[in-house]
Image (spheres, helix red, strand yellow):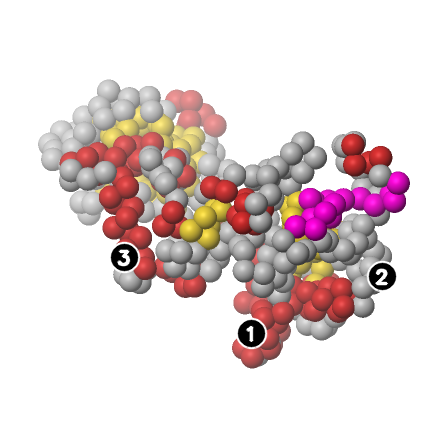
């Protein structure tokens, strides 16, 4: 019995014989030929049973814009298994290179396919290429390729995080306005630029001569202060914002947070104090390195004000919002009553499978999480697979956001 894949009339009409083969369905039985896919949308008609030569239109595969995945729609009356997930009639699921597809509700009696995306040079050429002169990707302070690049505003010049952090620290020591090291414009904001960081990393892979020594990189990292976006103000009214009763003050000073207005716990902001904006409520707080109260999530490096203000006994008001203390707390203190949808990349089928497994074991989700935290603390969990910025340094008592 020879296995073939055929296009439907609508798909074949749009396909060109010269179109490239961008994917194929590879059968587990080597006696059958692969189902090749050349059009961006194709209905697969082939044998689905290991004991019959009858052909059936059992699924439609549509190429996704990222060129690295496809969307499969079940066109049959049977349930289809994709990597163990049940896909019912007319339902869709995203398939990736290596996905196993069985055109039936179980493995017995049905053929098995593996979805494979071709990685030929023609496909690679479709991807967007950006050409950057290496001299335009260098920090004007150290004159080397950017490392952990940050962008300052409003001039939008770019520097190494460690280099600019040292420039910022020295400006504060002199109690002077922070000027851009390149154009000398007054700097109001500074933040990490993940897009340019990726470009710099690609340049290093392409040209190893641009690499710095490990000692130099380690030293730069010790200087780096920019984790979340920094608001660097001169203290004067120079930015548009909503009117508040504090605007009636006669000194013309722009107060960004409650410690700009009054001293709290022995600290009051100066006119040049650097501030952080909370990613939960949008409120402001002074950036206080080494103060002992967490202001950043150690997993994503974003800033949150709840732990800081609550530790000082400060509550929010109409002029200065304060977010909930729950937004930033130790991992072991977080309360999770249900599996977050993002835990399975918004795949409801996988989430339902996980829920079912927990129930079948006679466990509850808090029990499973407590066990996981204990294994995490004992370093039994492979941290390299975790999407955290500082996975090797995190413990059960590390503060993270929700």
Q: Nearer the viewer, mark 3 or mark 2?
A: 3
- Secondary structure under the numbered disc 1 in the rendered image: helix
Percent of width and height locating residue 227: 59, 57
- Work out which quarter of the rendered image holds the N terminus and state it: top left
Q: Residue at x 56, y 39 (%)?
A: 323
- Work out which quarter of the rendered image holds the C terminus and state it: top left
* Residue named by callout 3: 375
**Mark found first going from the N terminus, 3 or 1:** 1
Disc ID at residue 184: 2
Percent of width and height locating residue 287: 65, 55
Give the magenta range. Answer: 250-264
Magenta highlight: main SS: loop
For marks 3 and 2, give the CA distance: 51 Å
- Secondary structure under the numbered disc 2 in the rendered image: loop
Q: Residue at x 68, y 56 (%)?
A: 267
In magenta stretch: residue 254: yes
* Residue named by callout 1: 218
């Amino acid at each position: 019995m020879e296995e073939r894949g055929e296009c439907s009339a609508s798909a074949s009409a749009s396909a060109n014989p010269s179109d490239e083969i961008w994917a194929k369905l590879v059968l587990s039985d080597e006696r059958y030929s692969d189902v090749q896919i050349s059009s961006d949308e194709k209905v697969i008609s082939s044998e689905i049973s290991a004991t019959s030569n009858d052909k059936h239109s059992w699924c439609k595969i549509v190429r996704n814009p990222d060129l690295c995945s496809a969307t499969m729609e079940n066109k049959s009356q049977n349930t289809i298994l994709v990597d163990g997930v049940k896909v019912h009639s007319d339902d869709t699921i995203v398939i990736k290179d290596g996905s196993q597809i069985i055109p039936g509700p179980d493995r017995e009696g049905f053929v098995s396919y593996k979805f494979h995306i071709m990685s030929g040079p023609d496909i690679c050429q479709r991807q967007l290429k950006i050409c950057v002169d290496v001299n335009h990707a260098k920090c004007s302070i150290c004159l080397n390729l950017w490392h952990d690049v940050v962008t300052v505003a409003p001039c939008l010049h770019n520097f190494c995080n460690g280099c600019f952090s040292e420039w910022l620290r020295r400006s504060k020591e002199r109690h002077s306005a922070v000027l851009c090291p390149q154009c000398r414009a007054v700097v109001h904001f500074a933040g990490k630029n993940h897009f340019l960081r990726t470009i710099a990393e690609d340049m290093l892979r392409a040209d190893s001569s641009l690499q710095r020594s490990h000692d130099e990189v380690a030293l730069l990292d010790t200087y780096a202060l920019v984790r979340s976006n920094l608001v660097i103000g001169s203290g004067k009214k120079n930015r548009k914002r909503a009117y508040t009763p504090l605007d009636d003050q006669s000194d013309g000073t722009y107060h960004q947070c409650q410690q700009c207005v009054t001293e709290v716990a022995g600290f009051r902001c100066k006119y040049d104090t650097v501030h952080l904006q909370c990613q939960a409520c949008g409120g402001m707080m002074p950036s206080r390195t080494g103060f002992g109260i967490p202001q950043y999530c150690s997993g994503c490096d974003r800033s949150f004000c709840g732990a800081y203000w609550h530790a000082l006994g400060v509550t929010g008001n109409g002029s200065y919002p304060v977010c909930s203390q729950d937004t930033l707390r130790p991992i072991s203190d977080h309360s999770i009553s249900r599996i977050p949808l993002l835990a399975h990349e918004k795949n409801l089928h996988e989430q339902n499978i996980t829920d079912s497994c927990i129930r079948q074991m006679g466990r509850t989700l808090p029990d499973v999480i407590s066990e996981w935290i204990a294994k995490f603390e004992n370093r039994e969990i492979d941290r390299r697979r975790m999407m955290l910025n500082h996975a090797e340094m995190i413990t059960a008592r590390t503060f993270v956001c929700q």
